[in-house]
Image (tube, rainbow, N blue to C red):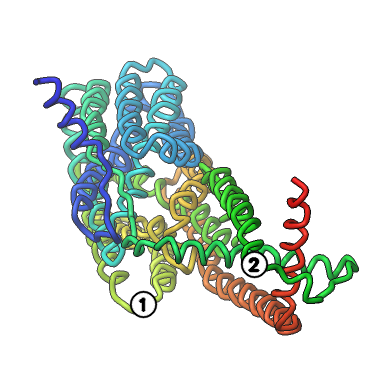
Amino acid sequence: MGLRMTQRKSQLCSRANVYAQVPDGGWGWVVAVSFFFVEVFTYGIIKSFGVFFNDLMNSFDESNSRISWIVSICVFVLTFTAPLSTVLSTRFGHRLVVMAGGLLVSTGMVAASFAQKVYHMYIALGLISGLGYCFSFLPTVTILSQYFDKRRSVVTAVASTGECFAMFGFAPAITALKENIGWRFSLLFVGLLQLNIVVCGALLRPIIIRGPESPKITAHENRKEVQYMLENEKTRTSIDSIDSGVELTTSPKNVPSHANMELEPKADMQQILMKTGSKQSDKKPPLLDFSVLKETSFICYALFGLFATLGFFAPSLYIIPLGISLGIDQDRAAFLLSTMAIAEVFGRIGAGFVLNREPIRKIYVELICVILLTVSLFAFTFATGFWGLMSCSIFFGFMVGTVGGTHIPLLAEDDIVGIEKMSSAAGVYVFIQSIAGLAGPPLAGLLVDQSKIYSRAFYSCAAGMFMAAMCLALVRPCKRGLCRHHDAGEAKAESRRVKALQDIPEDFLEMDLGKNEHKVHMKMEPV
């Protein structure tokens, strides 16, 4: 009895949710809450890692660029393994992949607390936790997009504020914690907290969208449909015979009687149905669809993501060292990161509500936000005191929220790839970001090591964001150009098809069909 109850509960938690259309709610609200906490324990921790920066430099006696490689390798693995995450999600489901990712994230963070050399941190946080971050984040945001349609932008934006609240809470909390128990035990504590990702993954029920069932077809109608398929098959045969020069006769003796016509349709019906069934069984959906790389609009959008990644992580990593270098107390410098996080909350929610309005061209709104984000990055290089950094942090936090919470869900828009290809496109898109994720923080650290001025780290971020704005501006024109070319080709093909059908005589199909059926009947008589 107890075993049956356990099995029923297991089936209740693991069964898929079936809807006639995208629910825009339902179990999707549970998925949204799960995504919120996945953001807390993935990107929230990555962006709060700056609180450990000076401690790691002092403990391992390493330079800025060497320590920044920890975050770089983590972000690189997170983005580089995105196609693997997509393939595993398609094969085993989003739930198992996210739960496995949670275990990897926690394992890597706990192992990092025992590191004795900086390369130990590269392996633990960079490789192990980085892979876990990818397995946790990407499947969650993908399945959340499948649960919502009209509310997708605002729900994703609100749910993605988890990383902002994590930055706001973790930055001062971890700073106070490591002053009492040290940075190693603080990393251990964070690693144990990240086990909550496993619980979030267990709540991700798969979703199946099934349209309303079509009315049942009677046997008479089914017979008519197969007969129509048969006539189409013979039409193609007859047209081929014209091209090959075979003589066609239309004498009355070649027209079969009703009794003779019953023989061939039954055999041909079976052959046609068998061919159709075999073709359908042979076609299997690909685990990862790289056809999105054929679309110029997606290539431009992927380049936008590539350059924008240069400006996503370095500011949160260097804002605390920058504040300390300008003579600001460490606690007040940590408050800068918290302020940036709160501003990012308002940016994400505001962008979600704006993009949820209809009608609106979302790609243009994103472009405006990226341009303003570039301006905010340049502003950091002119800040000289606490309030100057505070203003820049608020401006940057708000603008990075508008972009960070919407750039992946925008893949579902028709201006880019659409909801049908969103899962594969997200994997390829994040994979392309991996190059910038690996180069961004070390490039900023190299500028700091050479100039000994932390504000120089923001130059590379601003330059990358400027290139991202240029690529984003090309997405919509490329999409419109491809669509026009495609529509013109389809129109020409359709006109040729109609013209070919008009050239066929009216009695041609009946006469030629009769001829072929008569041949089959004559061959079967001696038997």
Residue linked to disc 1? 360
**Residue 387 shows in this picture:** no
**Residue 116: where, in percent of width, then height?**
39, 15
Which quarter of the picture shows residue 200?
A: top left
Q: Looking at the image, tell me whether mark 1 or mark 2 is earlier in sequence order.
A: 2
Q: Hey, which residue is sitting farthest front in the picture?
A: 526
The residue lying toward the viewer, choosing from 214 and 525, is: 525
Amino acid carrying mark 2 in the image: Glu
The residue lying toward the viewer, choosing from 181 and 423, is: 423
Q: Is residue 388 left or right of residue 268?
A: left
Q: Is residue 434 left or right of residue 49?
A: right
Task: Say how many tags the image has.
Answer: 2
**Residue 90: where, in percent of width, then height?**
43, 40
Residue name at image x 51 percent, y 67 percent:
224
With respect to residue 217, does 458 lie above or below? above
Residue 231, numbered circle = 2
Amino acid carrying mark 1 in the image: Ile
Badge 2 local density, few (<14 within 10 Å), some, or many (20+)? some
With respect to residue 498, does 343 lie above or below? above
